[in-house]
Amino acid sequence: MQSAEVTALPVIASWQQIHQPMLLRHQLELWVYQLNTAIPQLSGNKWLKLKYHIVQAQQLQKAGFLTFGGAFSNHLAAVAAMCHHYGLKSLAYVRADQLDKHNPTLAFCLQHGMQIQLLNREQYRLRNDADFLQQLQQQHQHFLIVPEGGSSAAGASGVAELELALTPNGTASHVICAAASGGTLAGIINSTGCKVLGIAVVKDPSLPARINQLLHSSAKQHWSLNTDFCGAGYARFDDSTIQFCRDMAQQQLYLEPIYTGKALAGVFTLIEQGYFSPGSRLSFFHTGGLQGLAGLHYRKLITTADFALLSGSAAG
């Protein structure tokens, strides 16, 4: 059940058709779906995965969210923005050895009132452990625990409201998105009858099981998870991925190389390999996350020129 407050954040949906010679050669259409709000950190899948957690917090009379993420996490920025917008508190357990207040993601979170507790890598592995979560809940009884990435039944329910199969040019044969924590992909599978393809951007053997846990009993068909494009692993990317993001920016499609850029580059590789039948119409969900570009620039993993280009600030 939605509350009037939660639906008050306006969203703007848009479709963009991608034009590339490869698509013509393979007789394919490719459409990219984007969802934006007035708060950039809540664009893509972020607002959708958190909206029903807000409902839960209101129903349970919780003071705010307790969640988990890495030091440059899109999810942490989204939670900080969401809670600030709705007047809730936010507490994050962050995988980091020290608090770097110059990190642009954590700086944003702190500016928006988020409290931060640090966990080392060993401790962070317990983030889905039932005993650990019960201990945290006892310590923070007035907080709603939101899983990493917002990937829960509530998060999947928000994503399921999208009509990703209905492109401006007709019904898609495939709906595709990046997959990391699994909630977005599960929500898409639950809501569409066409083929769904997830492109994993993490090396995580538990990902298929976590997706299955969030699926409706009637939805466990017509989907697949491709794990061929993880590269060196999560948050790692090569020169070809960055070049692909640059090429897409020339078409005013702005990507980052961790999630959407890596996944869409994988889609083009599959197209080249003949994975999709001629005449297929592909719908790709852009899950946002452009705030992560600032962190990549901060760590000197991308150049200043690429930061400007990929974030769209170099346009015009």
Image: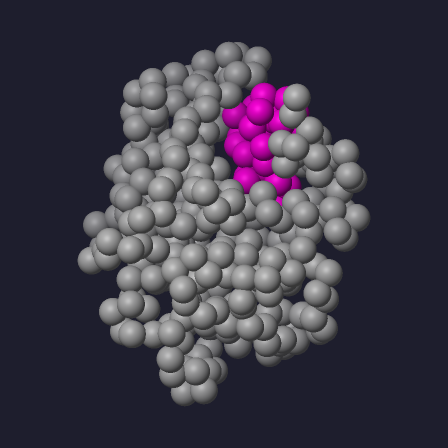
Say which residue appears at 34% left-offset and 18% top-offset.
169
In this view, the residue in front, 194 or 166, is 166
Q: Quadrant of residue 305?
A: top right
Residue 104, position as x, y percentages in the image: 67, 55
Say left or right for 273 vs 298: left
- In the rendered image, is residue 170 in sight? yes
Is 219 left or right of 228, judged from the image as shown? left
Residue 48, above or below 140: above
Up/down of 158 relative to 64, above or below: above
Q: Quadrant of the C terminus?
A: top right
Residue toward you, 266 or 107? 107
Q: Position of residue 5 (x, y in %)?
A: 29, 55
Q: Quadrant of residue 246?
A: top right
Q: Which residues are magenta?
A: 245-273
Left or right: where does residue 139 sit relative to residue 95?
A: left
Q: Residue at x 28, y 39 (%)?
A: 192
Where's residue 6, x and y in %? 31, 54
Residue 70 visible: no
Does residue 269 belong to the magenta stretch? yes
Residue at 34% x, 62% y: name it.
Answer: 54
Instruction: Describe the colour scheme in one phrase.
Output: one colour
Which sits in the foreground, 256 or 195?
A: 256
In the rendered view of the protein, which quadrant contains the N terminus?
bottom left
| Residue placed most toward the observer, 174 or 80 | 80
- Quick check: 198 above or below 149? above
Q: Residue at x 70, y 35 (%)?
A: 308
User: Magenta residues: mostly which secondary structure?
Assistant: helix
Q: Position of residue 315 (x, y in %)?
A: 65, 25
Quarter occupied by residue 281: top left
